[in-house]
Amino acid sequence: MNWDAIAAIGQMLGSVAIFVTLAYLAMQVKHARGELRRSIRQGRGEAQRELYLFRAGDQRINELAQRANAALGAAPGAFVHEMMEQTGLTRDEVSALNAEQIAWWSYRVQVVAYVDELPPEDRLEFDASTRAFYSVPYSRHWLEATKSRLNPNAVRYIENLLAQPG
């Protein structure tokens, strides 16, 4: 074998190595992009959950928001209106319950997005707690009243979960 043949083989192997390296880098970039999206989604969900829990727990802020909305002519949403009529709760009280439900939803929608990645025992626990949560009448009513505005994949997952024997 002469030096030209050896050089040609070396060049070919170098080209293959570059191709493999570029393919690996492309996979890494795709993975990093997915992790970045997941991280952003998680941060957004955690912030939203904290804000709604604050709103649910701070009666003064809740009252101010309700007074401002009423002064500006805003009608209560379907859930708030129905809960006020059916339970005798005040608008402030139902609004606090609504904020709490949104906070819980923010948590659940985050988990549903990655539920297949949970260890089996964690998924069983998540499914059982979700089923128990939406077995409570006002939580189930909230889901039914607001599902048209919620993440359809998460709604579908939870409705399928609730349809299963418990």
Image (cartoon, rainbow, N blue to C red):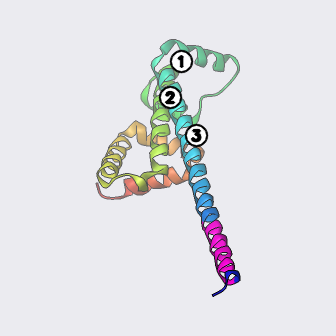
Which residue position holds label 1?
Answer: 62
**Residue 26 belongs to magenta span:** no
Q: Residue at x 55, y 52 (%)?
A: 152
Q: Quadrant of the C terminus?
A: bottom left
Residue in the foreground of this view, choosing between 49 and 152: 49
| Amino acid at dot 2 | Ala
Percent x, y of residue 151:
56, 48
Report whether 77 appears left or right of 87. right
Disc 1 residue type (three-letter): Asn
Q: What's drawn in magenta, residue-wise?
A: 5-20
Spot the residue most to the top. Answer: 60
Quadrant including the N terminus: bottom right
What element does badge 1 sit on?
helix
Q: Nearer the viewer, residue 113 or 10?
A: 10
Choose the circle earlier in sequence order: 3 or 2.
Answer: 3
Which residue in the protein does label 3 denote? 40
Q: Nearer the viewer, residue 22 or 10?
A: 10
- In the rendered image, residue 150, in percent from the top left (x then y), is placed at 56, 45
